[in-house]
Amino acid sequence: MNAGNPIQMSLMMRSVDDSMKGLANSVGQMVFSLGWAVMGPVSTGIVMLYGAYYGYAIVFSITGALYVVASVYFFLVFRNVDRPRVEDVSATTKPAG
């Protein structure tokens, strides 16, 4: 699943120096692909052990629970990040024309 990858890559690209963005992107994609490679056999084993109906239900339930945990984690980590106020943003932008 790819629900968290775009936001994770956006946060990483925002905090990495321009000269290191290529390497950071490569490492991020490698770690993302590594998760797919490692968990494929695990999820297949669960489906084979518990059968098609219960096996897929277990795998999708685990995936959903991990997404909830990750969402709560992102909320807790980034809830106090300074956000520019509307006045600050409008003062820095130039009018068109």
Image: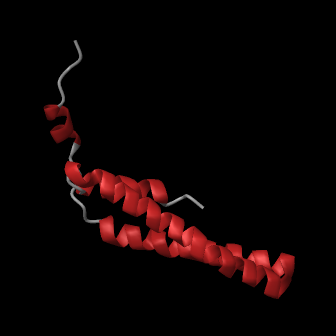
Asked if residue 61 lies left or right of residue 94, the reply is: right
Please report the residue visible at 81 percent of the width from the left and 81 percent of the height from the top.
54
- Of 29 and 96, nearer the camera is 29
Q: In the rendered view, would you say 40 is above or below 87?
A: below
In which image quadrant can residue 81 be found? Answer: bottom left
Q: In the rendered view, would you say 46 is above or below 8?
A: below
Asked if residue 35 lies left or right of residue 86, the reply is: right
- Of 10 and 21, nearer the camera is 21
Quarter holding the C terminus? top left
Look at the image and tell me whether residue 39 can be seen: yes
Give the image location of residue 51, x and y in percent.
85, 82
Look at the image and tell me whether residue 11 can be seen: no
What residue occupies the far top of the structure in this picture? 97
Total numbered badges shown on the rendered structure: 0
Give the image location of residue 80, x and y in percent.
25, 65
Give the image location of residue 92, x and y in percent.
14, 33
Specify how the rendered protein is coloured: secondary structure
Q: In the rendered view, would you say 26 is above or below 92?
A: below
Give the image location of residue 89, x and y in percent.
20, 38
- Of 79 and 47, nearer the camera is 47
Asked if residue 38 lies left or right of residue 30, the reply is: right
What residue occupies the far bottom of the structure in this picture? 49
Please report the residue visible at 54 percent of the width from the left and 71 percent of the height from the top.
35
Please report the residue visible at 61 percent of the width from the left and 76 percent of the height from the top.
39
Quarter holding the N terminus? bottom right
Please report the residue visible at 39 percent of the width from the left and 68 percent of the height from the top.
74
